[in-house]
Amino acid sequence: MAFVKKHFSTYWASEVKALLSGEIVPDKPPIILTFDDGLRNNATVAAPILDELGLKATFYLVSDLLNGKSMLWNHELRGRLMLMDTDRYAVVSQEVLPHAVSPSERQLVEEIKTWDHTKRTEFLTRLREEEPNPAFTEDMLKAWLIMDTEDAKNLPTCIEIGSHTKTHPILDTLELREAEDEIASSRYLLEEQINKPVPTFCYPNGNYTREMLSSVQAHYDMAVSVNEGFGSLAELHELKRIPAANNMRDFVFRLLRPAA
C-alpha cells in the first residue's frame, strides 16, 4: 500500500465516470482499490492500513450476511470439504466430479458453482444437516468470516460501500426475477443498515446475463466485473479490473499488462 500511495492517486469506484470523462484530473496516475465479499479481515486489517495511509477504497458487501458469523456459501463449502475425513470426501468427490482423480476442494467448489441454484442449495443444505456444527479452524475463520453491521458502520471515511448482492449467488444460475431481487434489494438493504449511499455494484464470481446487466444499469451508477484490463466509459457497468498479486514484482507487471 505504501507503493500505491507513492505512485498513484486513489479514488472510489463511484468516481470512475468522472475520472474517465476528464471531469476529475488526478495529479498522479489514478487507481481504484476494490475489496470483494465484506470479509471481517477487510475491516480489521485492510481498513486501518488504508485509513493510516489516506488511501480511498471501495468495499463490496453482501447485505444479508452482515451478522459476524456468516461465510460466503463457497467459502463455507470449501471449509466443510477440508474438514471431511478421507472416506466421506471420496464419496462427495464422486458425486460432484465422478470422473476426476483425487480432485482438490477448489476443483469441487468450482464445479459446484456451475450447478443450478436449486441443486447447489440442496447439496449444501444436506452437508449442513449432516454436520450442523463444523469445527472450522482459526485460520478458516480469520480468512472467511464476514464482518457484521457494526463493522460496516464503523469503517473509516476513506472507505466507500458497494453492493455484492444479498446472498452472493451465482447470478446466471438464478431465474431473472430472483437475480433482479438480489441486485436491486441489496442496495437498499445496505443503505438502510449502514446509513450510507451504495452507488456501485460487483457481480459475484463475475457471472451475469444481458438481462441482469440491464437490471444493474437501472439501479447502480457503475459496476465492476472480474474481467481483466483497464476501465473505459463504454463498459461502465462491466468495468474491468486488475487482480491483486502476492508480490510487488507481479503487482507492477499486472499494472503494466493487466490481462497478461
Image: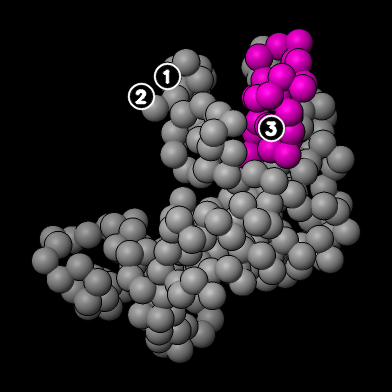
Q: Residue at x 72, y 61 (%)?
A: 187
Which residue matches tag 3?
17
Q: Nearer the viewer, mark 1 or mark 3?
A: 3
Residue 30 on the magenta span? yes
Q: Amino acid at mark 2?
A: Ala
Of the pair 136 and 242, the residue shown nearer to us: 242
In the displayed structure, 44 sits above or below 6; it is: below
Q: CA distance from mark 2 to mark 3?
A: 25 Å
Which residue matches tag 1?
257
Query: Residue 100: horizontal and vertical position, in percent?
Result: 14, 62
> Around disc 1, counting alpha carbons within 10 Å, would you say few (fewer than 14), some (14 to 19), or many (20 or more)?
few
Query: Residue 123: horizontal and vertical position, in percent?
Result: 37, 81
Query: Residue 132: horizontal and vertical position, in percent?
Result: 51, 85
Mark number, residue 220: none
Q: Residue at x 46, y 51 (%)?
A: 206
Tell me the quarter of the picture where residue 11 sits.
top right
Tell me the quarter of the picture where residue 88 sits.
bottom left
Q: Secondary structure at mark 1?
A: loop
- Residue range highlighted in magenta: 9-35
Q: Amino acid at mark 3?
A: Lys
Q: Nearer the viewer, mark 2 or mark 3?
A: 3
For the residues labelled 1 and 2, say whether their Cβ atoms are less than 8 Å apart: yes
Q: CA distance from mark 1 to mark 3?
A: 22 Å
Q: Earlier in the sequence, mark 2 or mark 3?
A: 3
The quadrant of the rendering that contains the N terminus is top right
Left or right: 231 as drawn, with respect to 166: left
Mark number, residue 260: 2
Of the pair 222 and 167, the residue shown nearer to us: 222
Q: Is residue 137 visible?
A: no
